[in-house]
Every structure is written in structure tokens, then in C-alpha cells.
């Protein structure tokens, strides 16, 4: 299939396909006599894997590692599990940071309901958010 059809079936753009090919995430396809790319169904499977891995939070560099591991040593399930463990730990840390930020925002919002706007000095932008 040509690049436009593959892009449509994969739900991506031809520009993304060329990028994946250049980045070696997607193998270079056969070419027709007239020079058009001619992809087979395995390209669609690879693209689905790439999109699924990205949806799970893996970076393209990590996806490339997984693909390379598959090509050189066989099923990379252990490597993928380690990457997903690291991603889950990153998400846990980010969630903790966001919870702290939410508490601070709520504290400032509560503070805003108790302050008198007339008491906001000319030297401050807004006394709801203390400077420094």
C-alpha cells in the first residue's frame, strides 16, 4: 500500500510516517518501479505498536529501544515491563506534585475569600498571592 493509504489506515500523517522511517522506527519499505513507497501489512502492525506504546507513555526513544531489543534478542517483554514500571513511578511522583499544587491553589483561593480588595497596597499586584 502507498504511504497515503497507510497513513489513513493508521490514523496518522504521511509526515509522521516519513519521520518514523527516518528514525528507524518503521523499516524502509519496498519501492515501486516509479519510486513510490510500497508498504505491507507489517508496517501497519508496527505503527499500531508505536501508537500503543506512546499511549502508554513511552517516548519514541524508548519505543526504538523496544524495537531494537525485539530485533536483536527476541520478545522484549521484560524490558517493556521495566519501562512501564519506571513510567508508573514517574506518574506517581507527578500525581503527588499535582496534589501538592492543588492544595496550594485551594489555600490561595481560600485566602482570596478572606482578604479585602481595598486593603491591597499599590506596591503589590494582588495580595492574594504573596510576593516572594
Image: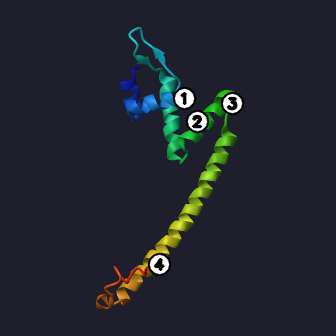
Please state if 8 lies on the left or on the right of 30 as rendered.
left
* Residue at the extreme left: 118
Task: Give above or below for 71 relative to 122.
Answer: above
Where does residue 71 sit, x and y in percent of width and height? 65, 28
Q: CA separation, marks 3 and 2?
A: 14 Å
Does label 4 or label 1 sit earlier along the sequence?
1
Question: SS for tag 2?
Answer: helix
* Residue at the extreme top: 33
Does label 1 or label 2 sit earlier along the sequence?
1
The residue positioned 44% from the left and 30% from the top of the image is 17
Question: SS for tag 4?
Answer: loop
Viewer-nearest residue: 51 or 113: 113
- Tell me whether circle 4 and circle 2 mark residues in contact (CB < 8 Å): no
Residue 132 is marked as 4
Q: Mark 2 points at which residue?
A: 64
Q: Name the residue under label 1.
A: 24
Q: CA separation, marks 4 and 1?
A: 48 Å
Residue 15 quadrant: top left
Amino acid at each position: 500500500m502507498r504511504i497515503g493509504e497507510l497513513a489513513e489506515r493508521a490514523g496518522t500523517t504521511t509526515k509522521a510516517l516519513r519521520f518514523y522511517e527516518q528514525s528507524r522506527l518503521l523499516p524502509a519499505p519496498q519501492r515501486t518501479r516509479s519510486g513510490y513507497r510500497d508498504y505491507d501489512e507489517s508496517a501497519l502492525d508496527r505503527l499500531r505498536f508505536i501508537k500503543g506504546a506512546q499511549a502508554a507513555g513511552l517516548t519514541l526513544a524508548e519505543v526504538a529501544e523496544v524495537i531494537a531489543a525485539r530485533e536483536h534478542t527476541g520478545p522484549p517483554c521484560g524490558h517493556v515491563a521495566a519501562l512501564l514500571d519506571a513510567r508508573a513511578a514517574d506518574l506517581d511522583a507527578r500525581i503527588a506534585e499535582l496534589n501538592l499544587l492543588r492544595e496550594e491553589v485551594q489555600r490561595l483561593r481560600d485566602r482570596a475569600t478572606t482578604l479585602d480588595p481595598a486593603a491591597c497596597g499599590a506596591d503589590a499586584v494582588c495580595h492574594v498571592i504573596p510576593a516572594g
